[in-house]
């Protein structure tokens, strides 16, 4: 009897790149995955993508609801779990009010639809408290660029660019497929510039590599701006007609002469000039691409605004080969911010970080931990977490564990037992990406794709079904009228003019609109706001920020470890440099990946290793003002990391760097925590 082999096309969600995949099944069993000819990846696939099979059939997958009884988990039936969770939510609501309940979506299920369903749910039950990993991811770049130009593009038009400047980003590790576009641009003659504190994988493939001290990118950017202005390598027409505050920036940038920039940032004059040469010869076909490396700092937003000001003065926004601004799909609005405005209920963190709240309409996770512990300004007693593992990934893990343990109700939706799930009252088995049908948009090509549900596992719900079932049990069913996610998807596409059938017929992506560049020009001609900022212009100077008490200009502030060096903490730690095979706290349970990268390590410069008298594999204690952690040493080549700088990647249970990252030091605009540029000391154990 021959076995029946079938291929189903869908999208990979082992990382956020969302590559098109062919999933092969034999007699209903998934046997292989390879890359499909989707617009985005055109046949390519990375190692994590292939590991989707390991993931789906992993022996440790949670397939039954778990309830904690006397400190131990016992399996219960789904209906019982849903009934009990709804009952406990009603108790929390009647004792403390609806705002004592909250929801948190993590990196593993975001963004778009899954995020908006979570937002909808929490508003539907009367609480403003929606949290996500975006208190420390992506939003720094998004707000930084949105303040200047009204939007940020995670996938700009790399392919047609003539100069790509990567600031604190390492696509070969973090966005394997996206890297192909950068390499294509390189083949077509684009100059690649990398600005990083480490000789990263993309730095090795760049024409220019500027090795900067952590947190000093704003000084580099302002130094570049000064030179571009002096050389008149700017788009004078664009600056005059579409920007605000250029003269102020020009005056301010004059402070950033070569001598200051080089001393402050650690790069040399030749490198600075080489960057300026690369940018000026590309004119507006320039992309400044900002990664996570600029976000986790106390002056992150202003450093990012300074970088965005480079795009502004060379006129690179919404250009072919520049920072292209895609048009949306135009689907139905799932969130209820207009229908159920809940500002009067004090969303957590909205008063502390008003810009973060205004731009993102979400609550601040670090503030939430303090709120749970102190019960101030009001008690936060219940939380549903899906696709996140904050006990590992949020800063100050000890506090996170203390806070989450104090909740009256913690529900975690998971595939595996995580550090966070361990703390839960209920752990519910969640549907993986191969068991969900959801819409995804690839901005670079303006392509929409509907993912294909390959199979379902009895008792394992997708996020929509779970929230639907709970909403109906707690009296918020009117907001969840769609029986399942398929029905929801029908409603979502209604206003787009594109049917579900069309999307189903195009599993390798459906281009919903042809690309149009320079939309600001057409908008200006039609009397519309050219850019989606407060004034409609590109805001090099932000009156909005000034009115809130911040600097209107992207003012540079020296990081604390430079401005206030302390003998006790002689080293500076960056964290989170991505390893290709792992995803934050994920994938540590895949044997083949553990063989490749078996443990967490502290990466050191050979000089620092020498003065600490440590060798590879030695166990050391790393201490910051937040706490201590133990980790093994990995000595890097002298060019790979700067002397005095150490790097530890997060996500390891036995070497958890977030035991020593700061939840108490923030960027004042977006509230992002200090997790790169942390003052530390190391002791040999
Ligand atoms: N394999 C894998 N891929 C991932 C992830 C993962 O965990 N694993 N995570 C995903 C997520 S959620 C995100 S947000 C993205 C992040 O995507 P990226 O930002 O591209 O990824 P990182 O590896 O964090 O790259 C940050 C770089 O910034 C450098 N850096 C640190 N501090 C500074 C600084 O102050 N200035 C400068 N100029 N550079 C600095 C680091 O050395 C590092 O090389 O990756 C995504 N992709
Ligand atoms: N020190 C330091 N810490 C950092 C960073 C850093 O650079 N340095 N980076 C930060 C960034 S950018 C981010 S985005 C955060 C990410 O942090 P988190 O949002 O916590 O992301 P993950 O660690 O990927 O956690 C995902 C969890 O979801 C589970 N999961 C996987 N697939 C599914 C699914 O389909 N459904 C459900 N319900 N669950 C699933 C996984 O088993 C895992 O336990 O980490 C941050 N933490
Ligand atoms: S880059 Fe790799 S893990 Fe990410 S979506 Fe593509 S194949 Fe999947
Ligand atoms: Mo992230």
Image (tube, rainbow, N blue to C red):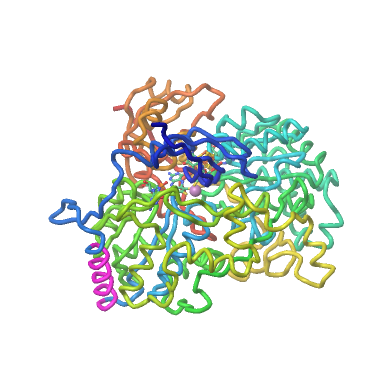
User: Residue at the spot x=46%, y=36% of the render?
Assistant: 5
Residue 83: say if magenta.
yes
Q: Is residue 80 visible to us here?
A: yes
Q: Is residue 299 left or right of residue 515?
A: left
The overriding secondary structure of the stretch rendered in magenta is: helix
Q: Give the quadrant of the C terminus.
A: top left
Q: Is residue 513 above or below residue 649?
A: below
Residue 228: image x %, image y %? 79, 45
Q: Could you say which quadrant of the image residue 603 lies in?
A: top left
Q: Is residue 649 visible?
A: no
The picture places residue 333, in percent across and down from the top left corner, at 55, 70
Residue 326 percent location from the top left of the image: 68, 56
- Quick check: is 677 in the magenta stretch? no
Task: Write the start and end of the magenta stretch as one range.
Answer: 81-95
* Above or below, comparing residue 88 to residue 578 in the picture: below
What percent of the width, then of the height, locates residue 635? 44, 23
| Residue 208 falls left or right of residue 369 | right
User: What count of labels does the image hold?
Assistant: 0
- Seen in the image, is 354 located left or right of residue 502? left
415 vs 368, nearest the viewer: 415
Question: Furthest-front residue in view?
Answer: 1
Quadrant into which the N terminus falls: top left
């Amino acid at each position: 009897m021959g076995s029946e082999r079938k291929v189903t096309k869908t999208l990979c969600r082992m990382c956020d790149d969302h590559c098109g995949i062919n999933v092969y099944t034999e007699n209903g069993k998934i046997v292989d995955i390879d890359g499909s000819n989707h617009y985005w990846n055109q046949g390519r696939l990375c190692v994590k993508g292939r590991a989707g099979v390991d993931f789906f059939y992993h022996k440790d997958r949670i397939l039954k609801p778990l309830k904690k009884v006397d400190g131990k988990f016992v399996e219960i039936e789904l209906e019982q779990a849903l009934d009990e969770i709804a009952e406990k939510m009603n108790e929390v609501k009647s004792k403390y009010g609806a705002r004592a309940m909250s929801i948190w979506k993590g990196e593993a299920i975001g963004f778009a639809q899954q995020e908006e369903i979570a937002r909808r749910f929490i508003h539907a039950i009367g609480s403003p408290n929606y949290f996500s990993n975006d208190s420390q991811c992506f939003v720094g770049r998004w707000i930084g660029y949105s303040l200047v130009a009204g939007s940020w593009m995670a996938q700009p038009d790399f392919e047609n660019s003539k100069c790509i400047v990567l600031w604190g980003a390492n696509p070969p590790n973090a966005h394997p497929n996206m890297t192909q576009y950068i390499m294509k641009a390189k083949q077509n003659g684009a100059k690649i510039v990398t600005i990083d504190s480490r000789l990263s994988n993309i730095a090795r493939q760049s024409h220019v590599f500027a090795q900067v001290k952590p947190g000093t990118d704003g000084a580099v950017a302002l130094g570049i701006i000064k030179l571009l202005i002096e050389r008149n390598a700017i788009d004078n027409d664009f600056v005059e007609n579409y920007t605000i505050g250029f003269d102020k920036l020009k005056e301010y940038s004059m402070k950033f002469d070569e001598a200051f920039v080089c001393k402050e940032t650690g790069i040399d004059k030749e490198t600075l000039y080489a960057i300026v040469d690369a940018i000026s010869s590309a004119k507006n076909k320039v992309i400044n691409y900002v990664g996570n490396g600029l976000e986790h700092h106390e002056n992150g937003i202003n450093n990012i605004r300074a970088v965005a000001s480079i795009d502004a003065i060379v006129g690179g926004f919404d250009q072919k080969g520049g920072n292209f601004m895609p048009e949306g799909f135009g689907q139905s609005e799932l969130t209820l911010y207009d229908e159920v405005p809940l500002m009067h209920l004090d969303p957590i963190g909205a008063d502390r970080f008003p810009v973060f709240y205004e731009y993102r309409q979400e609550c601040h996770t670090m503030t939430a931990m303090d709120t749970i512990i102190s019960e101030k300004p009001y008690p936060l007693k219940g939380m549903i977490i899906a696709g996140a593992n904050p006990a590992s990934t949020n800063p100050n893990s000890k506090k996170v564990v203390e806070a989450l343990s104090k909740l009256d109700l913690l529900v975690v939706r998971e595939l595996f037992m995580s550090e966070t799930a361990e703390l839960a009252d209920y752990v519910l088995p969640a549907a993986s990406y191969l068991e969900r049908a959801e819409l995804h948009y690839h901005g670079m090509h303006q392509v929409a794709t509907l993912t294909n549900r390959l199979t379902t596992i009895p008792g394992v719900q997708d996020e929509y079904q779970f929230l639907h079932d709970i909403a109906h049990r707690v009296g918020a069913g009117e907001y969840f009228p769609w029986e399942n996610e398929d029905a929801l998807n029908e409603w979502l596409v209604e206003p787009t003019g594109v049917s579900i059938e069309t999307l189903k017929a195009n599993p390798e992506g459906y281009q919903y609109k042809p690309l149009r560049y320079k939309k600001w020009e057409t908008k200006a001609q039609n009397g519309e706001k050219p850019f989606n900022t407060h004034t409609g212009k590109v805001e090099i100077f932000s009156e909005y920020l000034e009115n809130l008490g911040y600097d209107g200009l992207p003012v540079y502030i020296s990081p604390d470890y430079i401005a206030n060096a302390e003998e006790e903490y002689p080293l500076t730690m960056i964290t989170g440099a991505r390893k290709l095979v792992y995803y934050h706290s994920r994938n540590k349970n895949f044997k083949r990946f553990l063989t490749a990268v078996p443990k967490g390590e502290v990466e050191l410069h050979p000089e620092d290793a020498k003065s600490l008298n440590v060798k590879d594999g030695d166990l050391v204690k790393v201490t910051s003002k937040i706490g201590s952690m133990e980790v093994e040493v990995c000595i890097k080549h002298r060019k790979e990391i700067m002397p005095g700088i150490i790097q530890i990647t997060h996500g390891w249970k036995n070497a958890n760097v977030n035991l020593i990252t700061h939840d108490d030091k923030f960027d004042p605009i977006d509230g992002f925590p200090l997790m790169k540029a942390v003052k530390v000391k190391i002791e040999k154990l």
